[in-house]
Amino acid sequence: MADLNKLLGGGGKNLKMHEQRDAVRNADEAELREALHTADLELLNLRTQAMMQQASNPMRIRQVRKMVARIHTELATRAQ
């Protein structure tokens, strides 16, 4: 779960897109569901901050949305 936490939490390290995809692909389903839950909560908080114009990094919303989409895609692929 450490790799996905780095991806979702920012981690201070800029990861390449292929590294993010590999981390999502290599995670098991429980880790993906936990990461999805964490990302959903972060997205809610970021949107709230953006509405109140207190967001320190508005581009983070886009990053988290993309991560949520990656996780949903991977879960749907595994369900087939």
Image (cartoon, helix red, strand yellow):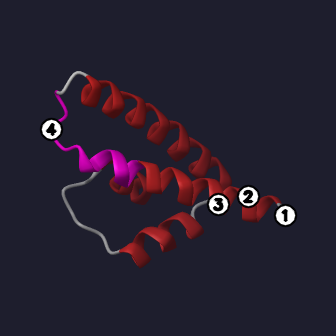
Q: Amino acid at mark 3?
A: Thr
Is label 4 or label 2 in front? 4
For the C terminus, the quadrant is: bottom right
- The kind of residue tagged 2 is Ala
- The amino acid at mark 4 is Ser
The percent coordinates of residue 15 (x first, y second) are 30, 70
Q: Residue at x 45, y 49 (%)?
A: 65
Residue 80, labelled with which disc?
1
- Residue at 81% over, 58% down: 79
Q: Secondary structure at mark 1?
A: loop
Residue at numbered disc 2: 76
Circle 4 crowding by C-alpha within 10 Å: few under 14, some 14–19, many from 20: few
- Element under disc 4: loop
As measured in the structure, the alpha-carbon distance from the residue carrying label 4 to the one carrying label 3 is: 28 Å
Foreground of the two, 50 or 20 = 50
Q: Residue furthest right?
A: 80
Cα separation, mark 4 vs mark 2, equals: 33 Å
> How many angstroms separate mark 1 from mark 4 (CA)?
39 Å
Q: Label 3 to label 2, Cα distance in Å?
A: 5 Å
Question: Label 4, on which residue?
Answer: 56
- Numbered disc 2: secondary structure: helix
Q: Is residue 41 magenta?
A: no
Residue bearing mark 3: 73
Res. 44 visible in picture: yes
Residue 71 left/right relative to 19: right
